[in-house]
Amino acid sequence: MLRSRSILEVVMRTRNSLVYSTARRTRSLNAPSPVQQFGRCGRIMKNPAMVMTIQDPASQRLTWYEPPLSVLVIKKVRDSSVLPPFVQLVTWLIEEKRMVVFVEASVLEDPALARDPRFQSVRDRLQTFRDGTDDLQDKIDFIVCLGGDGTLLYASLLFQQSVPPVMAFHLGSLGFLTPFEFDNFQEQVTNVLEGNAALTLRSRLRCVIMRKNEDSQPAEPPTNLLVLNEVVVDRGPSPYLSNIDLFIDGKHVTSVQGDGLIVSTPTGSTAYAVAAGASMIHPSVPAIMITPICPHSLSFRPIVVPAGVELKIMANSNARSTAYVSFDGRNQQELRVGDSLKVTTSVYPVPSICAADQITDWFDSLAECLHWNVRKRQKHLDELSDLAHSSSNDTLDSFDRDS
């Protein structure tokens, strides 16, 4: 009886330790399993036939278990061309759809909007917030972005945990991440509110800066941010090469000597990373890209690692200067010798709503925004044979005349 009890205690202790390790972080080649719920009432449609941890991208479709009631509208700043669509959208959402509309407080301070008579009729019915002050985590069911890719990055920054579904309209310069056209926005928004939409789960990187704890100074609280595109470690204003140590799952992989290093998501592979020579990866691929910036070695090529690994980046102890780190082009901070930056895949992706589907939207963006594989068509064989025949006849005629 005593032996049975001891075995039972060992089994229970083992089970508890397994549960604890799983709860801390789910790690596998397929990356941490993303949460299934977005905002207060958005989630991925359940697929009973699913046997993998990561769903088939084609099965990622939005469904609502409650009608969405609140919407956050983010517009591009300092662009007067976005104001008429913005007024038209928020008026329609309030008057026709009876939704609670949130906007940033600085939007109401725009003088151009203050002169718009139609906006004045809905101004007092808008809910406002201020970035860094108000928490929107449990208030928003749905997000609409009006502008360029920066509006989607800003939406990602506002929600550092679960992100509500994002519908992005192309009213900016490039529009790689904004697949919707604004011409028939009423029909498109209505389809989304009715749950007729495909999703692209854009993975994010969880970045934590751990400061060196010196005895003479109190330890600084760690910086913890989620980024959608990339985290960049570079030499900043220093004229010297950066000297950065890269660790993957605790093992030293290499030292980066050059202008810096880009650690990006598949979504970010078509941003700064592709300009530095990286490949373009579909956003549904569970991976992390590591791209050197102007490396001092011709053999140092970009690499792709599984999304489940943990990266640690540190300034080398023999580096001539410190390094600087920025997150999606924001919040630049100095990375001093002894500090470390840890990067993992977050369990909170950005659920981006597709205009058509994942494959169509991505390849359309490659073709329209980056002019991917655009070249003149090769001539048909019939055209070439006609040219060859005409040139040979001209040669024979000239030969007869000469003889």
Image (cartoon, helix red, strand yellow):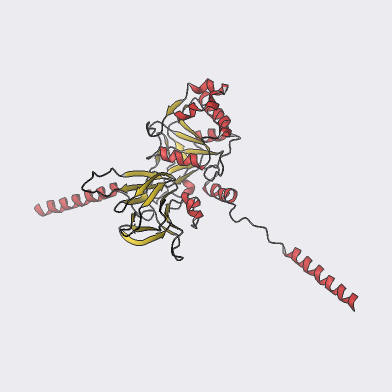
Where residue 266 sits: x, y (%)? 46, 51
Residue 188 vs residue 312, the one in the foreground: 312
Residue 154, by quadrant, is: top left
Residue 32 as seen in the image, left or right of residue 70: left
Identify the residue at the far front of this view.
Answer: 239
Residue 314, by quadrant, is: bottom left
Residue 92 as seen in the image, left or right of residue 30: right
Q: Quadrant of the C terminus?
A: bottom right
Residue 384 as seen in the image, left or right of residue 76: right
Where residue 188 sits: x, y (%)? 56, 35
Residue 301 vs residue 336, the one in the foreground: 336
Residue 376 vertical placement versus 94 (above, below): below
Residue 307 vertical placement versus 218 (above, below): below
Residue 159 visible to the viewer: yes
Residue 181 as seen in the image, left or right of residue 300: right
Residue 104 visible to the viewer: no
Residue at the image point whose x is 83% and y is 73% from the top: 395
Residue at the image point whose x is 51% and y is 54% from the top: 275
Where residue 202 sits: x, y (%)? 45, 46
Where residue 2 sits: x, y (%)? 9, 52
Identify the residue at the far bottom of this view.
Answer: 403
Residue 311, by quadrant, is: bottom left
Residue 256 vs residue 104, the one in the foreground: 256
Number of labels in the image equals: 0
